[in-house]
Image (cartoon, rainbow, N blue to C red):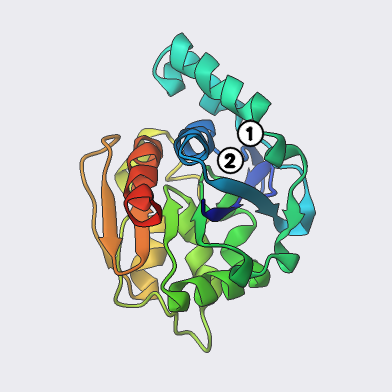
C-alpha cells in the first residue's frame, strides 16, 4: 500500500484581470476519479491545502452538463461526500515528502489563484521532482510549477508537460478575462509544452513527472500512476 499526498487549492475564487472574482475551487472529476482509482486499489490518501483550509469544490464541475451526465455527476458527488480526507486536510507547509510515495495535484481554476505563487507548494514540487517519486499534475494545477522558480529558473525546465490549453480556456469563455494564460506561462517557464485534442484525455509521462491536459485526463493519469505504485 502506497501513501499518496493530494495537494488541493484552498481558493474558492479566481481573480480575473478586471478585479472581479470568478467562483471556483478544485474540479470535481480531477479529485474524484483519481481518488476512487487509487483508494480502491488499496492506497492511502492524505489531502493537504494552503493553511489546512477545507477545499472548496467548484460547483460548476458538478453540473450534469459539465460532468458528462447526471449519473456521472452523482457518482462524483458521492465520492467527494464520502472522502473524509477532504474534511481534515493537513497544512501544506507541514507536509513532508518523505512521508509519501507519490504526490498528486488536481486542478480547477483554484491553483491559478493560490498555488501558482505558494512557496510551500513550490518547495514540495521541487523536492518531489528531484526525488524520483511519481508526481502527477492535471489541468490547471501545473500553474503550481510557476512557484518553483529560483532566480527565474525552474527545475521543470526542459520537461515534457501538458496542461489546460489556451484553446480550451477560450472555449469556456475565460481566456480574454484571465490575467494570464496557463499554456503561455508554462512555455515561458521553459517546459516543452505538448497537447492533444480539446476535451479528450491526454497524458504525458516524462521521467517521474505525469501531467494531464484537462478534466478527462485525470482518470487516465491515475491509471498511469498505478502502473508504478502497484
User: Which residue is painted at 65% across and 57% down in the image?
Assistant: 114
User: Which residue is painted at 65% across and 50% down in the image?
Assistant: 46
Asked if one can make out residue 98 in the rendered structure from this viewpoint, the answer is yes
Image disc number at residue 57: 1
Between the C-alphas of marks 1 and 2, the distance is 5 Å
- Relative placement, left or right, of 112 versus 155 is right
Q: Which secondary structure lies at badge 2?
A: loop
Please provide percent x and percent y for residue 112.
Answer: 56, 54
Q: Which of the two residues, 5 or 155, is positioned nearer the viewer here? A: 5
Asked if one can make out residue 212 in the rendered structure from this viewpoint, the answer is no
Callout 1 environment at 10 Å: few (<14), some (14 to 19), or many (20+)?
Answer: many
User: Which residue is painted at 60% across and 69% down in the image?
Assistant: 97
Task: Indicate which disc, 1 or 2, sits on the residue closer to the N terminus.
Answer: 2
Q: Is residue 172 above or below residue 118?
A: above
Q: Which of the two residues, 85 or 123, is positioned nearer the viewer here? A: 85
In the rendered image, which residue does mark 2 sit on? Answer: 26
- Relative placement, left or right, of 104 versus 229 is right
Dots 1, 2 in contact, CB < 8 A = yes
Callout 2 environment at 10 Å: few (<14), some (14 to 19), or many (20+)?
Answer: many
Q: Which secondary structure lies at badge 1?
A: loop
- Relative placement, left or right, of 86 versus 207 is right
Amino acid at each position: 500500500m502506497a501513501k499518496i499526498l493530494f495537494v488541493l487549492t484552498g481558493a474558492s475564487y479566481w481573480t480575473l484581470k478586471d478585479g472581479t472574482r470568478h467562483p471556483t475551487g478544485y474540479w470535481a472529476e480531477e479529485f474524484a476519479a483519481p481518488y476512487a482509482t487509487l483508494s480502491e486499489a488499496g492506497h492511502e490518501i492524505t489531502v493537504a491545502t494552503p493553511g489546512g483550509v477545507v477545499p472548496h469544490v467548484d460547483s460548476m464541475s458538478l453540473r450534469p452538463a459539465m460532468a458528462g451526465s447526471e449519473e456521472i455527476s452523482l457518482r462524483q458527488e458521492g465520492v467527494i461526500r464520502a472522502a473524509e480526507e477532504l474534511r481534515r486536510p493537513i497544512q501544506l507547509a507541514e507536509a513532508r515528502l518523505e512521508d509519501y510515495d507519490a504526490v498528486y495535484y488536481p486542478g480547477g481554476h483554484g491553483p491559478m489563484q493560490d498555488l501558482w505563487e505558494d512557496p510551500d507548494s513550490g518547495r514540495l514540487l521541487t523536492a518531489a521532482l528531484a526525488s524520483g517519486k511519481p508526481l502527477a499534475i492535471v489541468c490547471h494545477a501545473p500553474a503550481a510549477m510557476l512557484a518553483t522558480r529560483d532566480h527565474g529558473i525552474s527545475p521543470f525546465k526542459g520537461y515534457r508537460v501538458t496542461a489546460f490549453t489556451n484553446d480550451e480556456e477560450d472555449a469556456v469563455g475565460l481566456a480574454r478575462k484571465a490575467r494570464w494564460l496557463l499554456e503561455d506561462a508554462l512555455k515561458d517557464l521553459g517546459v516543452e509544452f505538448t497537447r492533444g485534442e480539446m476535451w479528450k484525455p491526454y497524458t504525458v509521462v516524462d521521467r517521474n513527472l505525469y501531467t494531464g491536459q484537462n478534466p478527462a485526463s485525470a482518470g487516465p493519469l491515475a491509471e498511469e500512476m498505478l502502473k508504478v505504485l502497484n
